[in-house]
Image: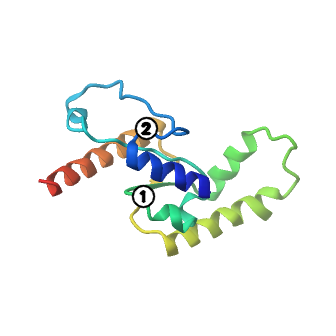
Amino acid sequence: MDEMVKSIRDWMKSHTSSGVMTEEPMDTCSSLKMTEDVHILIVEGFLLYNYEPLNELWNRRYFLTLPYEECKRRRSTRVYQPADTPGYFDGHVWPMYLKYKNEMEESASNIVYLDGTKSQEELLSCVYNDVIQELKKLREGSK
């Protein structure tokens, strides 16, 4: 985690830090034109919002939520080596999800909760539109 914080801080200083994968946007639609001088780093991972040094770095936070039944259904379709032992989901996975979510809600702010039952396209559209709105606010604030 400390190494991740260091890599992110380095990237924030230079936008070309080694160890951080970068991509140029493929889409050239008009809403992206306003981002010509803006660099966006997306960090994805489990338990990111419970580590305070990282919380100091985020501008936006997104968290996918799922109801119990859907989460259990999805977990049951995955193949793990070794396989989950009987009762593992109810005894460990779901309680840890709830514990993490509660801790995150207490310690992190400015979280956008996303309904994980929606399609990938709907979720991407929601995040994309939110990021564009944030960029507009940042641009207006810097004028």
Visible residue check, residue 115: no
Per the model, the C-alpha gap separating discs 1 and 2 is: 18 Å
Name the residue nearer the viewer: 90 or 35: 35
Residue 100 picture location, percent across and down: 62, 66
Identify the residue at image location x=40%, y=49%.
12
**Mark 1 or 2, nearer chain start:** 2
Up-down relation of residue 79 to residue 108 (above or below): above
Which secondary structure lies at badge 2? loop
Identify the residue at image location x=27%, y=52%.
134
Tag 1: residue type? Trp
Visible residue check, residue 136: yes
Residue 99 picture location, percent across and down: 64, 69
Up-down relation of residue 136 to residue 58 (above or below): above
Q: For mark 1, what is the residue?
A: 58
Closer to us: mark 1 or mark 2?
2
Tag 2: residue type? Thr
- Considering every residue shown, the one lying at the far left of the view is 143
Up-down relation of residue 27 to residue 66 (above or below): above
Name the residue nearer the viewer: 108 or 130: 108
Quarter that holds the N terminus: bottom right
Q: For mark 2, what is the residue?
A: 16
Identify the residue at image location x=88%, y=52%.
85
